[in-house]
Image (spheres, coloured by chain):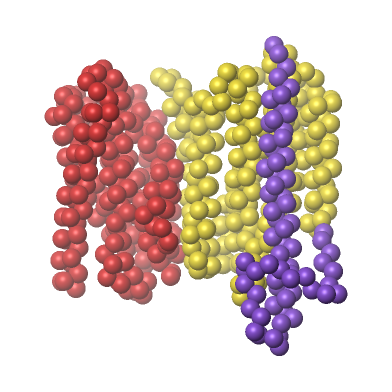
Chain colours: A yellow, B purple, C red
């Protein structure tokens, strides 16, 4: 099963690259540097998908105490943090030629940075507890707090950045994107999601093997 | 506007290095643990050998580790 | 039992004194770091105020379970019969009172040292400070219990708490800023709702998961 996932991910990545560099056109305003978007944007979608999985797995663990749920939560949050890191890094590299700066405290960057640090702290907690069962319990609670905090972070940061205006509930709609760009984004998203799922599966397997080794 | 292909290359390179590096780490860790666990399972008799987590995994003669 | 209460009372006074001196020290540092520019000081005042509140909170909350830890009473907590959520509420109430005292005094110090006029904004400020403090204490008490028995707890506690508190920090600072600029309470309604929502979430999670933390 994991192997299949891995191969599918590989195929997906190839397809994604073809779409991103072959099929998608040169963007009108930014030029070809915009192609960074094809890895940058899907990465954050995959990250949040992973955190969502981690959230549910944490809930399941607290309710049922199944070790598999704990391993899934751990793996998902770790992979989510990984992809979020890729998102931040590629975003900075995109920002330098586009905005002239590596970093800016705009709404999206800031909220992503906060979520990233929250889940880094989650991984730190995991590492700091030796007792396996206690670590699983505490991490599940922290995972739930962190996941529930994500919308709070998003709203607070977004309102912080739009001063003196009555806030709309969600971010304003993105500018109209040519369909081919949207399709390229989606293809890359599927590819990275498959890769993420493959990573989560393998990471969970490693966790199971580690437990066996320590038993 | 200039195309900045250099930045595109760096961005994708970063992604490849990070994601690829994580993948390699997973594979390596799985390999180490497989050897460790197999060794522990087979070491029913000889308790004197205490495989520790940091011990360099010894290759078992006659064992082939097929990786997915 | 009485001896434990005595220890707790003495410890609280210790903590209170330490936090007050800490806030005073922060005040001096802010003044020296920002220099005599009154306008710049006025513009960053809300941020400084909440920086002071949150840092004091982190220090104070980090000690929430100190008594149990130092006197080997942790097992007593774990074995206590009944709903562990009561312990959570008790600790929370204690922390809230402590923070309320510190915050009131820090606010007074700010008024004196930075020559701020709060009279027009006091009721609104009280609301914002109340909502913010409940949020800080709600998560802080939960995380304090979590890190009490963990390696490197003094480091891990702020590392866990501060990122989670970003929405509360943003909400309180922006609301305080608006109120000090004499904006009506209605103008900060969305921040108040955010803070209230955060409080509800944190309290709910705290109440529901505290026994999980205290399982061992």
From the viewer's perspective, tell me whether residue C168 is left or right of residue C182. right
Q: Quadrant of residue C51?
A: top left
Judge whether B17 appears above or below C179 on screen: below
Q: Is residue C128 visible?
A: no
Q: Position of residue B10 (x, y in %)?
A: 69, 30
The location of residue C34, given as percent across then percent down, is 27, 25
Disc tally is 0
Q: In the image shown, does B58 or C64 lie closer to the viewer?
A: B58
Q: Which of the two residues, B13 or C200, is positioned nearer the viewer here?
A: B13
Where C121 sits versus C128, above or below? above
- Residue A79 locus on image (x, y percent): 64, 49
Which residue lies at the image location 21% right of the left edge and 39% below the top edge?
Answer: C25
Q: Is residue A23 visible?
A: yes
- Residue drawn where x is 71% and y is 82% of the image: B43
Quarter of the image that includes the N terminus of chain C: bottom left
> Residue C178: percent from the left, percent from the top?
31, 24
In the rendered image, the residue lying farthest to the top is B1
Residue C94 horizontal side relative to residue A191, left or right:
left
Q: Residue at x 34, y 45 (%)?
A: C136
The C terminus of chain C: image quadrant: bottom left
């Amino acid at each position: 099963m994991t192997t299949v996932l891995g191969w599918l991910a590989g195929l997906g990545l190839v397809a994604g690259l073809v779409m991103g560099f072959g099929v998608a056109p040169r963007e009108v305003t930014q030029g070809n540097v915009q192609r960074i978007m094809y890895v940058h944007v899907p990465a954050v979608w995959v990250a949040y998908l992973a955190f969502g999985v981690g959230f549910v797995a944490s809930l399941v663990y607290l309710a049922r105490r199944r070790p598999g749920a704990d391993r899934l939560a751990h793996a998902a949050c770790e992979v989510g943090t990984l992809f979020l890191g890729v998102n931040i890094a590629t975003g900075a590299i995109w920002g330098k030629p586009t905005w002239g700066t590596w970093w800016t405290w705009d709404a999206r960057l800031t909220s992503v940075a906060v979520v990233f640090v929250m889940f880094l702290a989650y991984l730190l907690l995991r590492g700091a507890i030796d007792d396996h069962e206690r670590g699983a319990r505490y991490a599940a609670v922290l995972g739930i707090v962190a996941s529930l905090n994500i919308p709070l972070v998003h709203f607070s940061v977004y309102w912080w950045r739009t001063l003196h205006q009555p806030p709309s509930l969600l971010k304003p709609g993105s500018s109209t994107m040519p369909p081919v760009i949207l399709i390229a984004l989606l293809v890359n998203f599927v590819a990275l999601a498959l890769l993420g799922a493959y990573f989560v599966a393998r990471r969970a397997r490693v966790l199971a093997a580690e437990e066996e080794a320590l038993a | 506007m200039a195309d900045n292909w250099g930045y595109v290359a760096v961005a994708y390179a970063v992604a490849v290095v990070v994601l690829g590096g994580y993948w390699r780490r997973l594979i390596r860790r799985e390999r180490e643990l497989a050897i460790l666990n197999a060794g522990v399972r087979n070491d029913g008799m000889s308790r004197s050998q205490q495989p520790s987590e940091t011990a360099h995994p010894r290759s078992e003669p006659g064992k082939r580790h097929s990786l997915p | 039992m009485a001896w434990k209460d005595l220890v707790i009372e003495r410890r609280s006074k210790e903590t209170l004194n330490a936090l007050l001196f800490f806030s005073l020290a922060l005040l001096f540092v802010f003044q020296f770091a920002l220099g005599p520019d009154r306008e710049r000081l006025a513009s960053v005042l809300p941020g400084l105020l909440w920086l002071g509140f949150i840092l004091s909170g982190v220090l104070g909350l980090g000690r929430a379970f100190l008594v149990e830890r130092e006197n080997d009473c942790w097992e007593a907590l774990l074995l206590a019969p009944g709903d562990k959520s009561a312990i959570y509420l008790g600790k929370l109430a204690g922390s809230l009172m402590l923070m309320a005292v510190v915050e009131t005094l820090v606010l007074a110090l700010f008024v004196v040292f930075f020559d701020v006029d709060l009279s027009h904004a006091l009721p609104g400020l009280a609301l914002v400070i109340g909502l913010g403090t409940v949020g800080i204490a709600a998560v802080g008490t939960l995380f304090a219990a979590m890190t009490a028995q963990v390696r490197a707890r003094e480091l891990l506690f702020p590392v866990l708490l501060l990122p989670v508190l970003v929405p509360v920090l943003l909400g309180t600072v922006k609301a305080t800023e608006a109120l000090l600029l004499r904006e009506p309470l209605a103008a900060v309604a969305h921040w108040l709702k955010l803070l209230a929502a955060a409080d509800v979430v944190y309290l709910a999670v705290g109440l529901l998961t505290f026994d999980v933390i205290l399982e061992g």
